[in-house]
Amino acid sequence: MLLPIEDILPQLTSSLQTHNSVVIQAPPGAGKTTRVPLALLDAPWLRGKGIVMLEPRRLAATNAARWMASILGEEAGGTVGYTIRFDRKVSRQTRVEVVTEGVLTRRLQTDPLLEGVGAVIFDEFHERSIHADLALALCRDVQQGLREELRIIVMSATLEAAPVAGLLGDAPIITSEGRSFSVEIRHLPEDSRDPLPIAVSRAIRTALAVTEGDILAFLPGVGEIRRCHQFLQEGEALHSAPLIAPLYGDLPFAEQERAILSADRRKVVLATNIAETSLTIEGVRVVIDSGFCRRLRFDPGSGLDRLVTERISAASATQRAGRAGRLGPGTCFRLWSEHTQRTLIPADPPEIATSDLTPVALDLAAWGVTDASTLSWLTPPPKSSLEEGRQLLVQLEALDRHGMITEVGRRMAELPVHPRLAHMLTRAVGRGVGPLACDVAAIMSERDLVKASGGTALERSESDMLVRVEVLNGWRKGRRFAGGDAATCRTVDRSAQHLRRLLNIGKEHAVVGADAETVGLLLAWAYPDRIALRRGDGGRRYLLAGGRGALLSERSSVHDEPLLVAHVVERGERGDDLIRQASVLTLETFRREFSDGIVTGRNVFWDEREGRVVSCEEERFGALVLGSRPSAATADEVRSALVEGIVRGPGLSALSWSTAARRFRARVRLMARVFPDEGWPNLSDEALLATLGEWLGPQLDGVRRLADAAAVDLLPPLQGLLPWNLLRRLDEGAPTHLVVPSGSRVPIDYGDDGTPTLAVKLQEMFGLAETPTVAWGRVPVVVHLLSPAGRPLQVTADLRGFWNGAYQEVKKEMRGRYPKHPWPDDPWTAIPTRRTKGHERK
DNA sequence: CTCTCCCT
């Protein structure tokens, strides 16, 4: 039977005659993985060179190679071969080599020109793994530099093709039909509010009654799968008594097969995302999609990972539904509404946008690139994550200060582990603890070989890693062990052996015995930023050298250790992070090995509780304070600590604002408001606080306590902020006093913000019609007219109106109360005075 | 109520 892809092969071969890049968009079932490489073998531009095809998974890579070989009547390793970690089948005859992603990145580093390779094919590119994105950027760099004739073919199922075609210099886009059956999609009228396991189990009961064929249900994680399984077993018996099979990555192989292979009766598979792309399940006609998945998110601020449960993307929902249409027409039950469907993000963010980029930063440095933006990216790696990765690489000795790769860095880049572990390995080999380091690196790189669900409580230990090393060694000696997983032990052991070969560690260096002290040191080389010191309260709270607080999990084997390395840490939802695994680090070892990073320096800081500046000599490693004793400090240090303390703590109100200082400030604020273009300084709270060190600093010489700082007269330093010409203009524009008709000089109150008011006895203002002003007539002064006893009688900004009107009322009332003072009928002609009538006559 | 998935 002809595959749909056959129709586009002629177009593909002709496009590649004229273009060096092509994008193929073909849905699942089109047959692109096996047909495209073979169709290109005889292309004239290939000139007998080989083709490399990138596959995201090991199983897919070997299957594709075997299938293509069988089409040619050969076995894998002839014309068609493959290379995956631990397994390689290629020969001199091999022209098509299928590789997994890490293999290609590594090969690009050792053979940057890709000698002997005429074409690179990226299969399943829509998955946007970090490796595929990086490899594409590097291949494009090769193509644009020295190998213009290198062909790049990007194959993708659901990816929007235009952006990647644009990246490849407007590559032609060739679209193929897929071959799958229609799937009927059923949404709920409204989003379910029940917990996922309940909602899914209910949907399964319905599907069992109204559909036929095996059922595949997608849940976010193991916990939900377990509970859903329970709900199905409890309560009413299930229609057609099906086989219920959980399916997730941690499941032993035999149980995974039970879920994948067809059964003798109807089957219900409860799966994580593993069934979305990695595994195909036989016999599925019905999909039930919870709409959620669990993913790991890298948090650039903390350098830590976090597991989150999130709604899936629209692309993911399409992919999951498609799993019901491989045998014939199928049905997909979506446990969300059509309205919610329209709110789904179109596609999952590419891995490069959400991952730890330390490995990418090292690969780029090894490639000779210090500025990632000089390469072409479909999604550029986020600058903050990349920068954080670079800083870590400097700490790990892989990069120098200029971001150039070091000799150590080159050796690290050749090792197939995270740069942290690669650094540990290079250090360990020089110290004769290479074999143990290989075990530790392998354990850190693979699934946890101690199953938390095993039910066996871990024994108390100085190191969660030592516990695992001992489980591994127990497995090697064929011993029975509790809580360990044999399949993972086998993978870890193979990985450790592989590392030993790469590091030229022979068999003679067997691991004789591991001790907590050595394990702790190894991990400290990998995680110097996660060396952790217990907080003063002696509980399970720690401070990491990187500066974050963390809580040691109750499930860790480690207890009561003052200093440790936190090698598995999860970012907390809020507040402290969680240390899942830790190993003791003796203070002695730490001091000896990390003496370069331990610095002694003065710390002069504001002690809020004491309200004063404290200075001491501290011994620090990153954020950790190892020791501290009182010491002297320079005047500058004290001053800036004091200023910072005031700014962060009590603020301006802690200073003593004399009436004179307050009035001066208010006058300047008035002038600044009325004459904004004259260069008046900004004396608002915010501005004064922001520049506190500059204007007040010089007055604070020798001051350590807040109480002493509060005694400083603020007027002179504030005056110092004005040049002499503005000081003079201030006296004219915003005078301190006004002379009133009685001849008195009365002070003007400018409030805090510069609103002038004048409080004056009524009798002193007789005859004055015009309301007084400041700022050369631009700002009226609000007049508070006072009784002879100084009590407010009237507030007015219109004196003339007052004399002509309200005055008569005031007069009647006041005459009786203050008979010795003048209350004339005609205020216009009365003589203004501050005295009583008696004084006036004399 | 800890633990989606893949890979050198």
Image: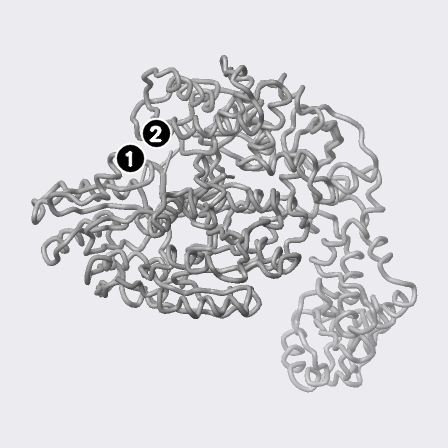
Q: Position of residue A76 (x, y in %)?
A: 39, 43
Q: What chain letter is assigned to the residue under label 2?
A: A
- Residue tagged by mark 2? A487
Q: Is residue A173 above or below residue A637?
A: below
Q: In which quadrant is the N terminus of chain A drawn? A: bottom left
Q: Position of residue A265 (x, y in %)?
A: 11, 45
Q: Where is residue A531 in the image (x, y as percent from the top left)?
A: 58, 29
Q: Is residue A282 above or below residue A497?
A: below
Marks 2 and 1, how far apart at CA: 8 Å
Tell me if mark 2 has few (under 14), some (14-19) or many (20+) residues whose alpha carbon lies within 10 angstroms of its own: some
Q: Which of the marked residues, 2 or 1, is nearer the chain's N terminus?
A: 1
In which quarter of the view is residue A362 placed? Answer: top right
* Residue at x-position 47% and y-position 55%: A122
* Residue at x-position 82% and y-position 74%: A740
Q: Nearer the viewer, residue A605 or A460?
A: A460
Q: Which of A274 and A102 is in front in this view?
A: A102
Residue A70, which numbered label? none
Q: Do labels 2 and 1 share a chain?
A: yes
Asked if residue A406 lies left or right of residue A177, the reply is right
The answer to whether residue A790 shows anywhere in this view is yes
Q: Where is residue A475 in the image (x, y as percent from the top left)?
A: 37, 20
Mark 1: which amino acid?
Phe
* Residue at x-position 74% and y-position 81%: A824
Q: Are marks 2 and 1 in contact (CB under 8 Å)?
A: yes
Mark 2: which amino acid?
Ala
Q: Which of A709 and A477 is in front in this view?
A: A477
Tell me if mark 1 has few (under 14), some (14-19) or many (20+) residues whose alpha carbon lies within 10 angstroms of its own: few
Residue at disc 1, secondary structure? helix
Q: Which residue lies furthest to the top in this view?
A: A512
